[in-house]
Image (cartoon, rainbow, N blue to C red):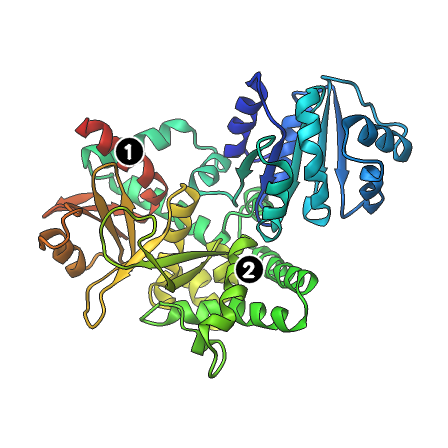
C-alpha cells in the first residue's frame, strides 16, 4: 500500500525538465523518502541501481579512483556485476548519504556528462550539509521532505482534491461549515494529531482501522531518534542534546512556553547549550520558533536568536512522549487540552512549517501582550492566535487597533469551532491550518 505524497508531483516535474540536475532529498528518518523515491523510479525507469550506504558499506569504495562518472560506474560494476548500468535508462539512487557525504562531489561529473539521472537521499543531512553543499554547489537540486501533513493524511483516508478546494473556498468566502463537516473534519484532524504524520504509522492505522499498536511504534521511533543522537555525537555533547530533547514536553507544558535552559539543567547557560539546540534543529527533529524583536515587517532578521520556543517536528511523537496519565486522557477522552494548550500550538507550528512558513512569535516585555505565530502577506503582517477553545483574543485586538503596529490590519484565530469574522479577526477551525499559506496568497491576489 503506497500512500500518495506531495513529493510525487515534484518528482514528476523534475523528470519532465530537460535540464534536470541530480537531486538531493533530505529529511528526518522514516518520513518516507526511500519509499517515495523507489515508487517513482519503478514507474519511470527501465532500470534502477539502488545503493544504501548503511546496509552496504562496501560501496563507499566506489570513489577510490576519483569522482568521475566512468570511475564510479566501473567500481560499481566490480562490486555489483549484475547491475544494469545503461545510459538514459538507469536511475542511480544513493541512499543514507549521511554515512558517505563525499558521494555528493560526484554530482558535478554526473551533471556534466548527462548520461544518468541521480537521486541522493539521507536523514540528518543538516549536520553535514555545508560539506555536501560545498562539494556540489550549482550541480544539484534540493527537496526537503517532512512527515505527512494533514492534506496527505486526507488523501490516505480517500479524500480527493475537491475537499481541499472546498475548505479553502469556505475560508475565502467566510462561509461556516455545516455541523456534519465540522464534526467529520474535526475528528479526522484529531486522529491525525494523535497519529502524527510518519507514513508507516499512518499506514498501520489505515490498514487496521484503530489505534492499537500505534503508541508502541511511536515510542520506538523516539528511541530510534535517541539512538541517532548517541551514534552521531560524542559523550558530553550527546548528554546535552538528549537533555534538551527530553525537556521539550515539560517546557511546552508551562504557561510561558518560551524555552528556558535552566529547566534543562540547574545553572545551565544558553550559550553552552545552543549547539545542542541547533543540532536538533539541523537533524530535523524539532522546529524553532523565534521571538520577534517587534511585530513588523520584514520578518527576516527580526527574530531574537536568544528567545525562542521549541516544538516537536511531529505532534504524534510529542504526544507519544507524554506521561502515562496524559496518554490515557488523550486517547480515551480525546482531551487535547491536557497539556495547557501545548499540543494545539505544536499542531499549528507543524502545519505552518510543513506549508513552508517561517515560525515567529511575539511577547512584549513586562506586558501581557503575546501572540503565538505570525504570517506575512505581500503587504501586511498577520498575527495568529491558537485557542484551546474559542475564547477571547485580547492580544489580537490590541495589535490590530494600536497604531504603533502599522503592518498589522487583521488577525487570525484558530479554534475548536467554526468560521467567523469580527473586528478584523478571522476565525477558522484548527483543521484549516494547513491551508493558511494558500489563504494568505488568495488575499494578495484579491488585493491586486
Separation of marks 1 and 2 at Cα, in angstroms: 33 Å
Q: Answer few, some or many: residues within 10 Å of disc 2's Cα (few below 14, many 20 plus, some between 14 and 19).
A: many
The N terminus sits in image quarter: top right
Regarding residue 417, the answer to whether it shows in the image is: no
Q: Is residue 93 left or right of residue 326?
A: right
Give the percent coordinates (x, y) of residue 433.
Answer: 33, 45
185 is higher (above) or lower (below) than 11? below
At x 73% / y 46%, what residue is drawn?
Answer: 100
The C terminus sits in image quarter: top left
At x 68% / y 68%, what residue is drawn?
Answer: 234
Give the percent coordinates (x, y) of residue 266.
Answer: 47, 83
Q: Is residue 400 left or right of residue 247?
A: left
Q: Nearer the viewer, residue 44 or 363?
A: 363
Q: Quadrant of residue 388?
A: bottom left
Marks 1/2 in contact by CB < 8 Å: the verdict is no
Q: Nearer the viewer, residue 249 or 419?
A: 249
Name the residue beneath numbered marker 1.
441
Element type at mark 2:
helix
Give the percent coordinates (x, y) of residue 251.
Answer: 42, 70
Name the residue beneath numbered marker 2.
279
**First along the sequence among labels 1 and 2:** 2
Element type at mark 1:
helix
Give the percent coordinates (x, y) of residue 158.
Answer: 47, 33
In the drawing, what numbered circle is on residue 89?
none
At x 17% / y 44%, what residue is drawn?
Answer: 420
Amino acid at each position: 500500500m503506497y500512500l500518495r505524497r506531495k513529493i510525487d508531483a515534484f518528482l514528476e516535474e523534475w523528470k519532465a525538465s530537460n535540464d534536470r540536475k541530480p537531486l538531493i532529498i533530505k529529511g528526518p528518518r522514516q518520513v518516507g523518502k526511500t519509499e517515495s523515491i523507489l515508487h517513482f523510479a519503478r514507474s519511470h525507469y527501465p532500470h534502477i541501481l539502488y545503493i544504501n550506504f548503511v546496509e552496504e558499506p562496501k560501496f563507499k569504495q566506489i570513489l577510490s579512483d576519483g569522482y568521475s562518472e566512468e570511475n564510479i560506474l566501473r567500481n560499481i560494476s566490480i562490486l555489483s556485476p549484475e547491475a544494469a548500468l545503461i545510459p538514459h535508462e538507469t536511475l542511480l539512487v544513493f541512499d543514507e548519504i549521511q554515512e558517505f557525504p563525499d558521494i555528493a562531489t560526484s554530482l558535478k561529473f554526473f551533471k556534466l556528462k548527462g548520461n544518468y539521472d541521480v537521486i541522493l537521499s539521507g536523514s540528518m543531512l543538516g549536520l553535514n550539509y555545508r560539506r555536501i553543499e560545498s562539494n556540489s554547489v550549482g550541480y544539484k537540486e534540493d527537496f526537503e521532505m517532512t512527515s505527512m501533513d494533514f492534506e496527505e493524511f486526507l488523501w490516505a483516508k480517500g479524500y480527493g482534491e475537491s475537499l481541499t478546494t472546498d475548505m479553502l473556498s469556505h475560508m475565502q468566502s467566510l462561509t461556516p461549515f455545516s455541523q456534519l463537516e465540522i464534526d467529520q473534519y474535526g475528528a479526522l484532524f484529531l486522529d491525525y494529531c494523535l497519529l502524527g504524520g510518519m507514513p508507516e504509522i499512518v499506514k498501520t492505522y489505515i490498514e487496521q482501522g484503530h489505534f492499537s499498536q500505534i503508541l508502541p511504534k511511536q515510542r520506538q521511533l523516539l528511541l530510534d531518534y535517541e539512538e541517532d543522537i548517541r551514534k552521531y555525537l560524542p559523550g558530553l555533547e550527546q548528554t546535552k542534546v538528549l537533555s534538551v530533547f527530553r525537556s521539550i514536553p515539560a517546557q511546552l507544558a508551562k504557561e510561558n512556553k518560551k524555552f528556558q535552559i535552566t529547566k534543562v539543567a540547574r545553572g545551565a547557560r544558553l550559550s553552552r547549550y545552543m549547539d545542542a539546540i541547533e543540532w536538533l534543529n539541523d537533524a530535523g527533529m524539532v522546529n524553532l520558533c523565534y521571538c520577534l524583536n517587534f511585530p513588523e515587517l520584514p520578518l527576516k532578521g527580526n527574530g531574537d536568536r536568544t528567545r525562542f520556543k521549541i516544538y516537536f517536528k511531529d505532534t504524534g511523537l510529542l504526544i507519544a512522549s507524554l506521561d502515562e496519565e496524559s496518554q490515557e486522557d488523550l486517547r480515551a477522552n480525546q482531551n487535547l487540552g491536557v497539556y495547557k494548550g501545548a499540543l494545539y500550538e505544536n499542531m499549528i507550528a507543524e502545519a505552518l512549517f510543513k506549508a513552508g512558513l517561517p515560525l515567529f512569535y511575539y511577547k512584549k516585555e513586562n506586558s501581557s501582550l503575546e501572540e503565538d505565530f505570525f504570517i506575512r502577506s505581500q503587504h501586511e503582517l498577520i498575527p495568529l492566535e491558537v485557542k484551546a477553545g474559542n475564547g477571547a483574543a485580547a492580544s489580537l485586538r490590541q495589535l490590530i487597533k494600536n497604531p504603533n503596529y502599522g503592518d498589522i490590519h487583521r488577525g487570525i484565530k484558530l479554534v475548536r469551532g467554526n468560521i467567523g469574522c469580527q473586528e478584523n479577526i478571522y476565525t477558522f477551525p484548527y483543521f484549516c491550518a494547513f491551508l493558511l499559506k494558500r489563504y494568505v496568497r488568495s488575499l494578495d491576489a484579491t488585493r491586486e
